[in-house]
Image (cartoon, rainbow, N blue to C red):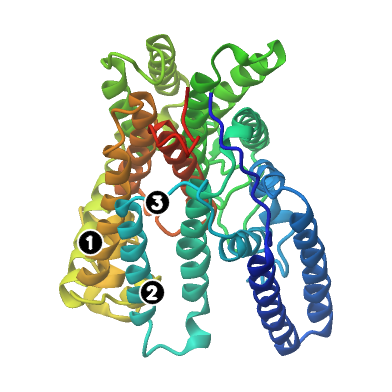
Amino acid sequence: MVNDGLELTIGRGIRSRRLFIVAALAFSLIALVVSISLISIKVAVLVMVAWTVLIWICIYCVRRRFDWIVLTWLVVFPFCYYLFSFPRERAVFTVDRAFLLLVLLTLVSTPRDHRLLPLGANIRFAGYFWAAYLSVCLISLLGHPVLDILSSYRLIIDGMLMPALLGLYAVKFFPIVHNLSKVHACVCILMISIAIVAGTELLSGTNLFPAPGAVETWVQTSNAKLIRVDGPFENSSVLCVVGTLGFLLIVYTRRLLGGSLTGSQRWLHSAGVLAALGSALMPMNRGLVIALLVCACIDYFATDPLVSRRIWNCILVALLLFTVIGKLFYPGVYENRVTSHANFYQRIAQNLQTLEVIRDHPLIGVGFGLYHDAVLEDSRYEVRWGGFEAMNAPHNSLSAVLAEEGGVGFVLYVAAQLFFVRSMYELRKVNRVGWRAFLYCILVYTIFGFDVDIGYYSDLNLFYMFVLGIILQIQLRMLPREPSNVFCYR
């Protein structure tokens, strides 16, 4: 059992209230300037109304516990992109940005307290390297007109900065002790809801929550076409990785809760596990299957596995069954996702193109998020292999970093990841099951990233960092401490 005895609220203490007021005024001024600068008066009014609602939420957080806002976000965040982003194209207001603003207010206004978990040197170094990497991302955009590359600045904030802030909050501030069962239930509900949406899309052939500018992708069969479902997310890659991360977190928190679950909670757990696996497999991504097989090989022969061998056997049988069904009844799907030479040759062409970009821009790269524009503007990067052209997108997370931020950005990016993993590796003996849960999340994200560039997606990175932060905080709380610090599992 864990006892942390600490309830975090925004603006507790005189110094914290002052910091909170200063931060709120600063952000209010920014919102006012942005809204006034907008051409449409209607848009400006709506932005200010949304900001007023946000201020009231802040006041609520001052008086109440902030963790309820976090748990609510955890359940509904994928659906907010379609329902509550404004304007729909190039949204200024999103629920994620409002939520992360509250997280930032929490970080800057929470007073120092001896009961807060101390961050080790590895986590601090990971933060320093990540801050340096973000600086390189900004430097790589110098020389480009700001108005022409607003999408790149948005990606830096939404996809790189905001997840890091949420990860810091999850590690240091989120009261996991009082909310472990709630996190388990919220993730189960999240997985069930996205599985329902993805399953409905697969059966109806309709994208229920289309992202702005998204293009539907289909797999041709002998007599019909199957849509590559993406659920409430931007694309199918995000859906399958979120489903896998949700599966790992549900299983791990269930292990920690032990026999304390009620009958209804056990049913919710089973439904959440099945929904998470369904969400992960429905997009039919090969890279995810490889990542799952790697995790299964490690876990299957572990003395104390995270996932029971019975569940791994069921997953492997399901994969084999789907493969056989696809081969017999949907040969077009089987060929497209398994035996097609087109995918292989096109990936070779793409890798050759990426290597040429890296060779021509070795230090700072072509600019954060500007790979596609750079290769289209220069005929030297027209690459073909086996009759197939390159896709003009890196299709590999590490290659994307190396091509767009150069060798300098690549070193900083990898160093930040390694120090973050090292912080958990040094605690592996405290709870090996927690270490394996953390490791499998890293492996799924990394191995899948070798097949698809997923490094810049905000929705995926936010959930990924929250999951890693929660697992790491639990591990830190299991670490024996001085008697004056009562954060420990007993």
Which residue is found at the position 37% from the left and 87% from the top?
A: 142
Check the image and name the residue furthest to the left. Answer: 359
Q: Judging from the image, what secondary structure is the residue with disc 1 in?
A: strand
What's the residue type where badge 2 is placed? Leu
| Residue 94 visible here | no
Which residue is found at the position 39% from the left and 16% from the top?
A: 312
Q: Residues within 10 Å of mark 3 (few under 14, many from 20)?
A: some
Q: In the rendering, which numbered label is found on residue 119?
A: 3
- Residue at image mark 2: 370
- Residue at image mark 1: 384
In the image, residue 281 above or below residue 84: above
397 sits to left or right of 326: left
The spot of residue 436 in percent (x, y) is 34, 29
What's the residue type where badge 1 is placed? Arg
285 sits to left or right of 89: left
Which residue is found at the position 80% from the left and 56% from the top?
A: 60
Question: Of callouts 3 and 2, which one flags the residue occurring earlier in the amino acid sequence?
Answer: 3
What's the residue type where badge 3 is placed? Leu
Q: Residues within 10 Å of mark 1 (few under 14, many from 20)?
A: some
Nearer the viewer's eye, disc 1 or disc 3? 3
**CB of mark 3 within 8 Å of CB of mark 2?**
no
Q: Judging from the image, what secondary structure is the residue with disc 3 in?
A: loop
26 sits to left or right of 376: right
Q: In the rendering, which numbered label is found on residue 239?
A: none
| Residue 255 visible here | yes
Closer to us: 322 or 383: 322
